[in-house]
Amino acid sequence: MRTAGSLIAVALTLAACTQTPEQRVAAQQADAVAAEKLGKALAGLTPDKPSSSCMPRFPTSQVQAYGPTIVYTVSRNLKYRTDTAGGCERVGRGDILVTQSPIGQLCQGDIATTIDQTSRTFSGSCSFGPFTRYSKSGS
């Protein structure tokens, strides 16, 4: 039998996990902005048909987050996209993405962490989904 105290605790927990209508609208707007920016970042590039479970490491690449999606830019004509379950969105605001891979490539299931550039403190983590290569046709 549940006590009144445990029912109140459950109710408070559920209330803390639900979004207000304003928060839902703000989240939907942020998702729409991220999707638009992602579309622009990949414009003119064609995705390879099969998604790869890994991405080779490149000496230099730029990393950007568009909501839960991370894009590695190798060059103007070559990018890799991975969708995460979320947690690394702060890369889009300038946080540092830290990855470790024992095999020299980033792979589906690898876990990345994010570090705040100013305070150098942990700010999030995520796991990578499959990697999709985007390139200019003929590249």
Image (cartoon, rainbow, N blue to C red):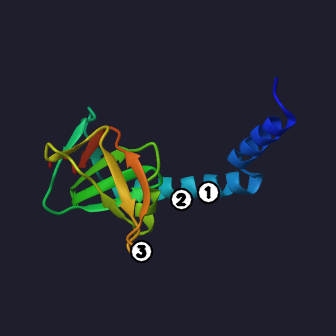
- Image quadrant in which you'd find residue 117: bottom left
Asked if residue 62 lies left or right of residue 32, the reply is left
Q: What's under tag 3, amino acid-wise? A: Ser
Quarter of the image for the N terminus: give it: top right
Q: Can you see residue 43?
A: no
Q: What's under tag 2, amino acid-wise? A: Val
- The residue indicated by pointer 1 is 29
Q: Mark 3 or mark 1: name the one nearer the start of the chain.
A: 1
Q: Mark 3 or mark 2: name the one nearer the start of the chain.
A: 2
- The residue indicated by pointer 2 is 33
- The residue indicated by pointer 3 is 119
In whole angstroms, how far apart are the C-alphas of marks 3 and 2? 27 Å
Q: Position of residue 98 (x, y in %)?
A: 30, 58
- The secondary element bearing badge 3 is classed as loop
In whole angstroms, how far apart are the C-alphas of marks 3 and 1? 28 Å
Vertical relation: 78 (above or below) 105: below
Q: Position of residue 80 (x, y in %)?
A: 27, 49
- Image quadrant in which you'd find residue 97: bottom left
Q: Residue furthest top?
A: 1
Mark 1 vs 2: CB contact within 8 A = yes
Q: Position of residue 48 (x, y in %)?
A: 25, 39
Q: Nearer the viewer, residue 53 or 39?
A: 53
Q: Nearer the viewer, residue 43 or 110?
A: 110
Q: Position of residue 49 (x, y in %)?
A: 27, 33
Asked if residue 62 lies left or right of residue 59, the reply is right
Q: Residues within 10 Å of mark 2 (few under 14, many from 20)?
A: some
